[in-house]
Image (cartoon, rainbow, N blue to C red):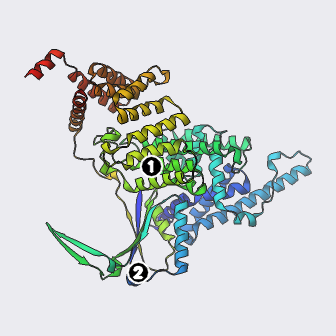
Amino acid sequence: MTAAEAARRAIDAVWRIESARLIAGLARIVRDVGVAEELAQDALVAALEQWPESGVPRNPGAWLMATAKHRAIDLLRRRERLERRLQELGHEVAAQQEAVEPDLEAALGEDIGDDLLRLVFIACHPVLSTEARVALTLRLLGGLKTEEIARAFLVPESTVAQRIVRAKRTLAEARVPFEVPARADLATRLSSVLEVIYLVFNEGYSATAGEDWMRPSLCEEALRLGRILAELVPKEPEVHGLVALMEIQASRSGARTGPSGEPVLLLDQDRTRWDQVLIRRGLAALQRAEALGGVLGPYALQAAIAACHARARAPEETDWARIAALYDALAELAPSPVVELNRAVALAMAFGPATGLELVDELTSEPSLEEYHLLWSVRGDLLAKLGRHDEARDEFERAASLTRNGRLRTLNLERAAASARLSAPPSRQAATKAR
Amino acid sequence: MRFMMLVKANEDSEAGVLPSKEELAEMGQFNEELLKAGVMLAGEGLQASSKGARVKYSGDKRTVIDGPFTEAKELIAGYWLIQVRSKDEAVEWASRIPFKDGEVEIRQVFEASDFPAESFSPEQAAREQAMRDELQARAAHQ
């Protein structure tokens, strides 16, 4: 490896570690995340030019920050001069150019954590579309390149680039302040942040074997963002709840697909393949959420449900009654037909298939679930357990026809066939028994 | 991906000499940085090898050898488990460990996806599933 190559790789790594803090610190000075990112990029270019010659500095993060800050000051001075000249010419000064010479000494001393938090909130600001929030978060906080985001989300690079450009413009035009939201808004703003992180996680979690490795790596990105956020706002139980949920879900990633990539259902998974480090971390995060007191939020409740599974060494040891109770709480807090369906499954496991079926039957009239394959495969499963194989077969077939996932379709068709075998004409069954 | 940063032992660590106050403070700060960056999964310091043992395997035979062990440089005195996106990033983190001397080895951790799933053909899996269904169905009949 040449010195230049070594320096470039070191710079990549430093960028990955430092870029978010760098952009955050600059954004406070220039009050514009777009400009802040450009300045940070300029510093990166300077590093690429100088480090191969001079070697990587002892404290690369500080080097980048100092370089970028000089440029920020230059920029502000230019703005100021421009403004003065404009005034001299008698022009009206555009309000957005009110350049305030920042108190750099104070700025340097201020807690970088606060800046990072401001950056998190601005990247996930409600004026932006969900897609824009996701792209901007991964770019500004994850240090991902546009090209990497595009690969991860299976969209053209130009689409992501455009999303990011537009998002920055929207933030500038809306004059979104670079600040941590006021107490009154904090809960809603935070839930927007959590939503973005969980969305990134799920995108990675839904990746299938053979896809670009950037996709599954989104899970790690989301976990990293979640863990960072948990350190930034340690008193927010839902942040720990989300981290717990992601850690526990990620712990199963080695067990949730079979040899040819087919999905393996939770209860059929080889639990020895669950990652115990992540489970422990998940349980610890859940404990932090619970220790903060108050009513558990939707993420913490889902984490608590995941924890019930994680604690059970074997499927038979699962505490279904507790899971059912947690779904009760979740249904009250964040009611949705899908939560109801999960509650039905838990009830069936805790108190027998008939109890679960009662609730599922109520849900069959729910329009939003009509096309939802899981409703029908769950109903099929409960009917099969009750020995009503004829009806079960119909439901599995319906479920198969509703899923676009080839492997799930196969699974449902196999179950339909099994039910069909079991619902053989009564005469033959009787004959078999007689023999 | 995950990496282990393995701290090599030295005479002090083998003699059970505890780190100084300053060293502990610096290390605490480094750990805090790892935590804030969301990359640290676990980390521990290990006691001297005199408090440990080795188990050797030869067929069915097991031989236990109590510590201490010589060649401090070959021994491990602690580790961090970190989750990062590249080996370069792991190297950058390791460069920031506030050590004055000694050595840290960086090793990538196997992930579940690095192993072929069990030697279990899809047909076998499907048969197993069907069997389970039938068993369940029969249980429901009784």
Q: What residue type is labelled 2?
A: Ser
Check residue A208 in the rendering and tell me which mark sits there, or answer none: none
x 49%, y 40%: residue: A153
Label 2 sits on a secondary structure element that is: helix
Quadrant in the rendering for residue A54: bottom right
Where is residue A235 drawn, in percent x and y? 60, 54
Q: Name the residue under label 2.
A: B13
Tell me where residue B59 sits by quadrant.
bottom left
For the point 22% across and 46% down, which residue is it? B119
Q: Say whether residue A249 is visible.
A: no
Where residue A302 appears, as percent x and y from the top left, is: 48, 42
Disc on res. A217: 1
Vertical placement of residue A421 versus A265, above or below = above
Quarter of the image containing the N terminus of chain A?
bottom left
Q: In which quarter of the image is the C terminus of chain A?
A: top left
Mark 1, other Cα within 10 Å: few <14 / some 14–19 / many ≥20: many
Q: Can residue A121 be seen in this view?
A: yes
A249 or A316, which lies in front? A316
Q: Compared to A52, does B133 lie above or below?
A: above
Q: Where is residue A182 in the image (x, y as percent from the top left)?
A: 71, 48
The quadrant where residue A397 appears: top left
Instruction: Work out how far the residue at label 2 is from the one at label 1, CA to CA, in angstroms.
Output: 37 Å
Asked if residue B98 is positioned above or below residue A214 in the image, the reply reads: below
Establish whether labels 2 and 1 are both on one chain. no
Question: Dot 2, crowdedness within 10 Å: few (<14), some or many (≥20)?
Answer: many
Residue type at mark 1?
Ser
Identify the residue at the far left of this view.
A435
Labels 2, 1: front one: 2
